[in-house]
Structures are given as structure tokens and as C-alpha cells.
Amino acid sequence: MTDPARPLAVGDVIHGFAYGAFGRDHYHCVRIEAVGPDWIVARGPGSEWAGLSFAAGRRLESCQQARDEPCPNDTPCPFASAEPPLTDHQSQQRGDGHDC
């Protein structure tokens, strides 16, 4: 039996196509900016890829796999020299199931 993958977290980089987790036309690496119980929101590096990417449900397993593999697009990955996130905001669990 294999070990379960580490949960996705804010700051993780998901590489390349991600096995279609963000749709068939998504090919660039993204950094996770927000996480929920069964969803993530991520953004690509730099201003040229300012759009957000969203994945939920079973697609998160594909994101975990793509995160744990080497970047297939570039050497080094675009995030190797990317600016750090603009904030270090961390969600605080209130205990009632809502993040704030």
C-alpha cells in the first residue's frame, strides 16, 4: 500500500498540465493561493498569466501528483525565479467550518 500524498497547501507549486485538473488548455505551472475543504485556487507567475485557476473534488489528486513531480515545461520551473506571493495571508479556522 502506498502512502497518501501530502495535502495541498498555500504556496505549493503545481507543475504543467496537471493531468487535466484545470482543463485541457491549461499548460503552465501555478502556485496555490487559497485552499478549502475540497478546492484550490492557484495563479501563474508574473503579470502575463494573471488569471486564476480553480480545481475541486477528485481533480485535486491530479494536482497532488503534478506537484510532486518535476516541472515538465521548463528547466528551471518558472516559479524557481518568480516573485514571492504578495501576501502571507493564512486562513484561520474558527471551529465552525468557516474560514475567515
Image (spheres, helix red, strand yellow):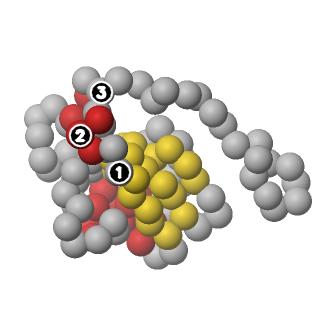
Which residue in the protein does label 1 denote? 51
Whether residue 17 is visible to the viewer of this picture, yes or no, is yes
Question: Do callouts 2 and 3 mark residues in contact (Cβ within 8 Å)?
Answer: no
Question: Do callouts 2 and 1 mark residues in contact (Cβ within 8 Å)?
Answer: no
Between marks 1 and 3 in the image, the one whose residue lies nearer the viewer? 1
Give the Cα separation between the discs numbered 2 and 1: 9 Å
Give the Cα separation between the discs numbered 1 and 3: 16 Å
Q: Secondary structure at mark 2?
A: helix
x, y percent for residue 81? 25, 24
Instruction: Point out the image quarter for the N terminus.
Output: bottom left
Tag count in the figure? 3
Give the Cα separation between the discs numbered 2 and 3: 12 Å
- Direction from residue 73 to residue 87 in the image, left or right: right
- Mark 1 or mark 3, earlier in chain: 1
Task: State which quadrant residue 59 falls in.
Answer: bottom left
x, y percent for residue 66? 30, 56
Q: What's the amino acid at mark 3? A: Ala
Q: Secondary structure at mark 1?
A: loop
Q: Answer few, some or many: residues within 10 Å of disc 3's Cα (few below 14, many 20 plus, some between 14 and 19).
A: few
Residue drawn at (58%, 53%) of the image: 35
Residue 72 to residue 60: above or below: above
Residue drawn at (20%, 67%) of the image: 25
Which residue in the protein does label 3 denote? 82
Whether residue 1 is visible to the viewer of this picture, yes or no, is no
